[in-house]
Amino acid sequence: MPKTPTRIHPPSNIDPNRLALVASATPNLLVMLDEAGRIEWVNPSFEQHTGYSLTEIRGRFPREILYGQNTDSETVKRINQKLHCGEVIEEDILHYTKSGTPYWVHTYCVPIGGEQGIAPGFIAIQNNISDRKNSERGLRIAASVFDRSHEAIMISDQSNRILDVNPAFSRITGYARDEVLGLNPAILSSGRHSGEYYRSMWQSIEKTDHWRGEIWNRRKNGEEYIELLSISRVHLEEPGQFYHVAAFSDITALKNHARELDRAANYDDLTGLPNRQLLEERLRTARKHADRQRRSLSICYLDLDGFKAINDRLGHAAGDRTLRTLSERLTRALRSGDTVARIGGDEFVLLLQGDDNHDAVYQRILATIGDPVPVGDQSVTLTASLGITRYPEDGADAEGLIRHADQAMYSAKEKGRNQYHFFDPGLDEHRRNRRNQLMEITRALENEEFELYFQPQIRITDCQLLGFEALIRWNHPAKGLVSPGEFLPIVENSHLEVPLGQWVLKEAIHQMHAWKEAGEDLAVSINISAPHLMDRSFADYLESYLYSHPEVNPGQITLEVLESTALEDTKRASNVLARCQTLGLQVALDDFGTGFSSLTYLRTLPVDIIKIDQSFVRNMLEDANDHAIVESVIFLAQRFAHPVLAEGVETMEHARALRHMGCNFVQGYGIARPMPASEVLGWARQWQERLESGKHGDALSPVLASGEGI
């Protein structure tokens, strides 16, 4: 039967005004609707809670102002049906305030009308139940999390008796819920952990209400597993009341995978030895330990001699067996704190700790390799090359120590098989400094920090200007002007020798062109190193550059080749110089007398002029041997019909002696110091003016004529 509607009958003996006061004072939300369901009146609590005033909502349907996007349509449908039938309504429904904030209400709505002697309609009494709804939702979520969590959850009381577990607990441990209720979680204990371990755990819970860590437990079937466990102590409002909530996950597979990854990342697949990554980590630790203990380390790089022949002759499987056998032998030969690592095909690194590593230790390592290795029905005998560096004598980092031991190993190989060699930190520092210097010179070339200076060369018979020798200088941004003696030895036999030589050649020809445009046709001598001359692109580069400067007369260019620099292929050098002569250039043999092949060069190389090294000229007045050398060079040059130019002429006495010996040309500080290109034209014109003014007279030598010095 349909529910009989509740009718409201106000007491006849109560003043209606007092009833109105009740409606105004109640915290409940009161709404009066007309027969059609439109709002006629709301109490102040409704206005305050919803934000709507009576004036702005009177005559409107509740659905127009209170319903929102999440209001349940089925609930709305039931309410509308009961309103239409004039039935009592009792529903929970989601409403929205004027500002859009949702809130839940329990609505109790009854029809009113003729029995009360008033116009028909409805009175709705609403209670705000948002807190209850939120709590219910929270409980539903918590229950869902508890049931669906992939982590096992276990709740126990103050006595640590199990009150509840979730399905994940049963899945991980194998125990059903009803099997563990009321029991102590110790049923899961694996026995791996000591009593002290558990006491420490409970002390943390007592102190901080929390503990987190890894622990080994045992499933119902006896299988051990490792879990990541978190235990929290939850306090209730009642004094002294608390529970334990333990959540854990099975990380056995994760741990196994981590071990596999660690092995793959840190160990060699074939031999099981540490690989380079783990070696460097251990070496970094060993360095710190050695620093604290003030002890030494030996880092030994071992490479098998001729191992490739085993793979080629017996196959890779035999080679692998040999490597495994040697790995085991090396491991047994070392102390427990030492490390053997395989870092390549047949390359091993040994980390030996302590100060007592000496020649006998290294000999023993080589002997270990030298013992025959059985491979199938035969045996093979190998030797090894061992490179050694010592820390802290070699203060490099882990990577550097391994690299230095590797360098020493190559030096051992150069000695022959079955040898060891020690790395020399001092020699390495020299190489490193040279490498840094070469990098600085490379940057100087890129930044155009080099400049050519020019020193005049004079014909001694009449003081006429023969030309200028181009000499390189470095305008260092910090050091100022740097002489060639400070950087050319660094460049020698390096990758920069040819680029720097090409720069000098190009810059000298460019400067000749500039002087030509200024009205002066000046000859220039250019120093060419042996590697530059022997470079296969030398003659082609020179020819192309001369072709791009047709105004420069090749006959005024002299290439000076250092006699003191051995030309390994004199035939090829002769061909290159001959080609340069066909281009019109002249060739000078520089620093004659300082090398070992002077006569050979005179006989085989196409030479136009001989230059005597200044080291002989400078001391020839005091040193009879130097005087004899200078005299002999001039004599030889005359016999080969080559003119001679003497460097290092600094005084009148030098000039007189050279003139007397038959020298043709001179240069040196006695004439002029090397000067920047910007000063050359002024100096040359001033020199010519002095000649034309007769200051030097018409004598064969300005020194002999004027007595003033050159």
Image: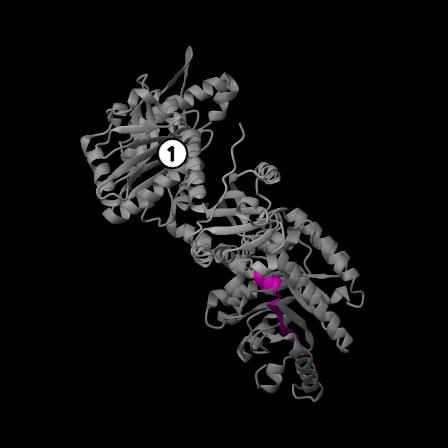
Instruction: Identify the residue at image location x=59%, y=52%.
Output: 39
Q: Nearer the viewer, residue 220 or 650?
A: 220
Dot 1 amino acid type:
Gln
Q: Position of residue 196 (x, y in %)?
A: 19, 34
Does residue 54 sit above or below 64 in this rendering?
A: below
Q: Position of residue 455 (x, y in %)?
A: 62, 73
Q: Is residue 450 magenta?
A: yes
Check disc 1: other Cα within 10 Å, few if <14, some if 14-19, many if 20+. Answer: some
- Does residue 592 appear in the picture of this structure? no
Instruction: Identify the residue at image location x=32%, y=49%.
Output: 393
- Does residue 409 appear in the picture of this structure? yes
Q: Which residue is mark 1?
A: 419
Q: Is residue 457 left or right of residue 195?
A: right
- Look at the image and tell me in which quarter the C terminus lies: bottom right
Instruction: Identify the residue at image location x=45%, y=55%.
Output: 19
Does residue 313 sit above or below 200 in this rendering?
A: above
Q: Is residue 190 left or right of residue 425?
A: left
Q: Is residue 580 magenta?
A: no
Q: Position of residue 567 (x, y in %)?
A: 60, 50
**What is the magenta range?**
443-462
